[in-house]
Amino acid sequence: MTDDGLVPLCDEAMPSKATRVVAIGVAVFMVLLLVGGTLWQTIAPAPTRRVIGREAADQEVAAAAARRVSDGSWMRAVEKDLKDASQTKYVFSPYWSEFLFATFGETDEALLAGSDDWLFLRRRFTRLEEPPYFNGDEISRATAVVTAIARRLETVGTRLVVVPVPRKCELFVDHLPGWVRNPGVGMHNAFVASLRAEGVDTVDILPGMWAAGPTSWWKHDSHWSDRGAKIAADSVAALVGKFVPPGPAPKPVESVGLRESPSDLLRTAGVHRADGSGPRALVERGDDIRVLDPQTRKPLRNTPPADVQDVSVCGTSYSAFADGLFPAIIGARLGTPVSVDAWPALGPVEPLRRAMTRFSKSRFPKVLVWEVPEHEPFCVDPDFGAIGEAFAAVPDAMPFGVPAMPFIQGPKVEQRHDLNGVGTGWVFFRDSFVVPGDGVLSIRLKGDVVGAPVRISVSTDSMHASAEWVPGSPSITLPLLGDGLVRYVRIVAMPRGGRAVIDLKSIEAVTSLDLADATALEIAEPVGKDASVLAEVRFPDVANDAQWMWLRLGFGGKYGAVRLVGLNGDKATSWTFDLMRERYDREIVLPRRRGLTGYRIVAVGDGQRPKIDGLLVRTVRAP
């Protein structure tokens, strides 16, 4: 202690000269790095990342939100722009991301790292957390969309061939981490079986992919490899060849070497940039498969014809992948040109709408191959209301079996509507309006449109579809996609870009079921002592004659609630639905669901027991 009572500092506590020099050097370096990095990013900012499809739409929404200052949106947007423009981050972050993934298996939150460096997109797993990780409603809804389009295309002589693309996580379950609970294994087989049960031509590519093993898909990409595209195309060509005569000169399809994976998941992980640059240690290579010139044996450019051919392919990035390798191989196997309508990042419905619009201006192909990634209907949950646009693009030239069925009760609709900037709507109530589950029931408006196009929206309790009714078209037909009882139908007309006049002649509920070619069903007496059972209807043992049931009940003016109960033999199943109290006759179209042998008509509730004065039951066939 010194004379003034203070404790002197030890010599060891004072930094050495060398330490001070290092500290000053580090400080100067950080200042220079900060100033230099700021000048670098100001003078030469990092390239702006290009986005397409839904990501571009999300970016527009974020930009609109960033205009708000009060909630901090603007400041967050500025911070994001500064990070995106950072040259330092642009140069060094891919190598850091590669180190984290290769060493610790850490990656972007949108991805899931599996064994052997496999990468999976999390959003392509199912939404449900418990087995079986998907349900019958999802399968039925997706089947309804596809079947509705298939039936609609039949009216113009086009055969629809559907190619469900299984999800990567269902194909390669063995490469998923053991803790993953919801890959949804079995979803593909259920979807394919459901489509085929409705008579839709469906190509099952899953067995071929499994047989090829991991070589059918890229580990670091969300798409199939060239080998996987070849497997899918060969399966499609085998089926399409039954409908379209093969051309005179099929072309050989062979591997001409190796090529690098597109590695879109490495871009998501931050290892690669949008232009594909970045660390190369994780780049995988696979067969570079091409269509060859039969004479020179040199690879041909995949250049689809601009006009509509007898065979056309519509799809997503799987069809656009590798410069359209998938449709190119289909054309090579058939020996005939194949036209293509494929766009990435838009889902399966928008490319279909664009294809239908293009066909309507020239001609429709004999066969339309529709590639549908299964993650769209079962994981992403797309807006199937947009299917109305594709549906309405098909010419409404042929009647749907029965031109007008009396499903709808409502006000008189034969009237003129002057739409000048505002819309108008009609609401119809009818308890017995039942959609059979495959979209074959539709709402058709007939009349004349003058002036601007009019957007017609048709909605029910649980369904929605919309499309533009253009001037010069005498009608517009929109499908009701779903399954079950409809308590109301709401139709809204809204002008698009100016004044429009609708001279509305009729609104009809139409169906593609052939009621004229029907078969009578046996109506059995009630069994047992249950007085609430009014009647039983049995399907005949002919599958093709018993796919659907058209039922008309007359209640003789008495009130009462009625329930239809599915039968399997003499046992009631869990599938039921109620027809609520009503004085009117009611007409419904019912599907013959798998395992059902008939229906039981049961009186329910405390109201009066309805008396069935008339019961007309017929099976109907789809065209």
Image (cartoon, helix red, strand yellow):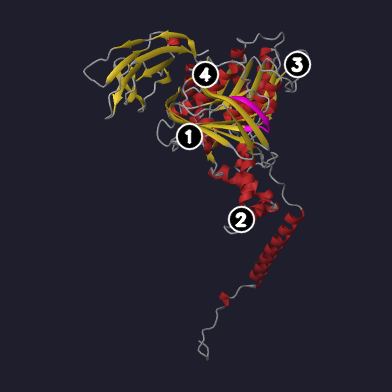
Asked whether, in this view, residue 441 is left or right of residue 272, the answer is: left
Q: How far is the residue under mark 3 from the one under mark 4?
A: 54 Å
Asked whether, in this view, residue 74 is left or right of residue 169, the answer is: right
Count of all numbered marks drawn on residues in the image:
4
Q: Verify CB contact (< 8 Å) between mark 2 and mark 4.
A: no
What span is colored magenta in the figure? 445-454
- Reading the image, the residue beneath label 1 is 126
Q: From the viewer's side, name the closer residue of 500 and 186.
A: 500
- Reading the image, the residue beneath label 4 is 404
Task: Please state the horizontal and vertical placement of residue 309, each as a whole percent of the image.
Answer: 70, 17
Q: Which mark is residue 293?
A: 3
Q: How far is the residue under mark 2 from the one under mark 4?
A: 52 Å
Task: Please state the horizontal and vertical placement of residue 95, each as a whole percent of the image.
Answer: 64, 46
Q: Residue at x 27, y 19 (%)?
A: 533
Q: Quadrant of residue 485?
A: top left
Q: Earlier in the sequence, mark 3 or mark 1?
A: 1
- Badge 4 element: strand
- Reading the image, the residue beneath label 2 is 68
Q: Which mark is residue 260?
A: none
Q: Verify CB contact (< 8 Å) between mark 1 and mark 4.
A: no
